[in-house]
Structure formats: C-alpha cells, structure tokens
Image (cartoon, rainbow, N blue to C red):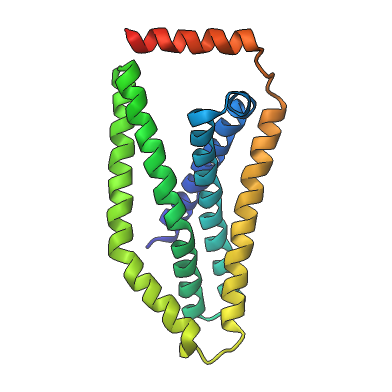
Amino acid sequence: MNILLICFLLLLNLGISYWNAYVCGKCWLEVKSVGGWRRFIIWMAALQSALGFTWCYLIILAAGAFHFHWISALSFGVSLQLGYLLIIPGLLFSGFMITLDSWAQAFRQGGALNYGVAAYNTYAQLHNTASAISTMGDAFGEVFGFFSGSDDDNAAPVLVIALVLIALLSGVLTTSAIITRVSGSERLLSYDEMEARRLAGGRRARR
C-alpha cells in the first residue's frame, strides 16, 4: 500500500478518535449527572476513541521499532495482529451499542439525518463484524505460533507485548486527557435546564 495512503488513513483515524473524545467531553458532565443509557453510550464512544488512538499509536510504535531494527519484520506483523485481537472485541461491542442507539434515535425523532446516521452505523458494524470473522482466525494463528516458539529471538515476544501495552495505555490516557480538558471548560446544566431539555426531547419524539 502506498505510504501516502497509509499516512492519510492514519491521520483520518486519529481525527475520528479525537472527535469522539471531544464529543464525549462536551456532554460528559451532563450525562454523568443524568446517568442511565446516555451515560453508557458516552462510555461506548469513549471506548471507541481510546481503541482508535491505540491502533494508531501501535502502528507508529511498531513501525518505529522496525525502522530502528529493534524488532524483525515478523515481530512487526505480530505486534499489529496482537493489537488487532486486543481491540477488535471492544470496537465491535461499542459499535453495536452505538448502532442500537442510533436506530432508537431515528425511530423516536425521525428525519433523514437520523436515518442516515443509523444506516451508516449499521453498514459499518456489519462490515467490521464480517471483517473480524474472516481475519481473526488467521491473526490468532500467527500470534499463537509466534509466542509458542516460532521466533528464535527470545526478547522478541517481550518487545511485542511491550509495544501493544504502551500503545493501549497511551490511547486510554489520550482519550482521558481530551475528555477531561473539554469537560472542564463546559458549564454543568442546572436541574431545571436538564429537565427542560428532557421534556423538549420527549415532545420531539412524539411528533
């Protein structure tokens, strides 16, 4: 794959992950006070953000380690496969929950935009699920073979695990930092304001 296309997709994923964290931060204080399903969905969006950052960081870290000859080409591939196996369950679960919520919003509020969002989420979820079904078996086989002794370098498994854990921790911390920074600049709505917003949403749903 062309290096420019890889860089574009990497930047796109970073942008999407940042946007997810930013949106979570904008309504974090409100949903924390309200609780319930809305808070759960915001947590799902935050999970998607953290895992998105994790995948981008893992690519950068693994590519850097390979460039400086700290890991082999085999270790580079296995680190990506292990990262994929780690993040795909969370992405599929959070994506499914967000898809359910988008269809609920479309059913209650209607409108071309809501139905469009629901349709896109459904397509993305089906595509991601089908891709996971077709690739997880091979990924697991490669990772298992690598850690069961297919690599002569005894330090390689440790480096691979370290890269994945560093990427995961960095992804979680990045999302947390963005949410904290954005939510810190948002004013918490009063009870009357939240009640008025809830009633307004109920009236739109009954139309």
Image quarter in which the C terminus is found: top left
Report the residue at 33% width, 72% height from top.
Answer: 138
Residue at image coords 60%, 60%: 167
Residue at the farthest bottom position: 152
Q: Position of residue 112 (x, y in %)?
A: 28, 20
Q: Residue at x 57, y 66 (%)?
A: 164
Image mark count:
0
Q: Is residue 137 above or below residue 169?
A: below
Give the quadrant of the N terminus.
bottom left
> Is residue 70 found left or right of 204 in the rendered image?
right
Q: Position of residue 62 (x, y in %)?
A: 55, 68
Return the x and y of residue 160 as percentages of the image width and height. 57, 74
| Residue 69 in sight in this render | no
* Residue 63 visible in the displayed image: yes
Q: Is residue 21 above or below residue 157?
A: above
Percent position (x, y) of residue 82? Answer: 48, 69
Asked where in the image residue 195 lies, by quadrant, the reply is top right
Residue 140 quadrant: bottom left
Left or right of residue 155, residue 17 in this image? left
- Most foreground residue, 198 or 52: 198
